[in-house]
Image (cartoon, rainbow, N blue to C red):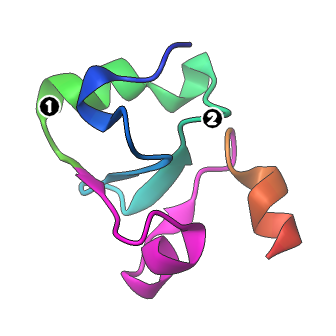
Amino acid sequence: MSRPARAADHRWFGDKRSQVVHDLDHTTDACAIDDLLAAETFIVFAPDTLVEARNRCYHACRHCAAEEEDAA
């Protein structure tokens, strides 16, 4: 899957509805990033890290960020 144009400079892409953060470098079809873009309920983080997303109470997506979560 290609990176969305709205998040071209970001790796971590959060869903405000479910408080789940996606790793755009490892997304799968199960992540439904296109639906998230259509609903316009996304957030990006600064600094662009999983740690910052967790600081904002977001949880790693089990489909695309599982490896990163285990490493943290």
Q: Is residue 16 inside the magenta stretch?
A: no
Query: Residue extending furthest bottom?
Result: 55
Mark 1 Cα-neighbour bin, 10 Å: few <14, some 14–19, many ≥20: few
Query: Which label number is shown at residue 54?
Result: none
Q: Is residue 54 inside the magenta stretch?
A: yes
Q: Position of residue 64 (x, y in %)?
A: 67, 40
Query: Which label number is shown at residue 25?
Result: 2
Q: Amino acid at mark 2?
A: Asp
Q: How many marks?
A: 2
Residue 44 appears left or right of 58 = left
Q: Say which of 58 and 24 sits in front.
A: 24
Mark 2 Cα-neighbour bin, 10 Å: few <14, some 14–19, many ≥20: some
- The residue located at (40%, 27%) in the rendering is 33
* Location of residue 11 with respect to 1 vertically, above or below: below
Badge 2 element: loop
Q: Cα distance, mark 2 to mark 1?
A: 21 Å
Residue 10 appears left or right of 15 = right
Where does label 1 land, which residue?
39
Badge 1 element: helix
- The residue located at (56%, 13%) in the rendering is 1
Q: Position of residue 67 (x, y in %)?
A: 83, 53
Residue 70 appears left or right of 28 = right
Q: Amino acid at mark 1?
A: Ala
> Magenta stretch?
43-63
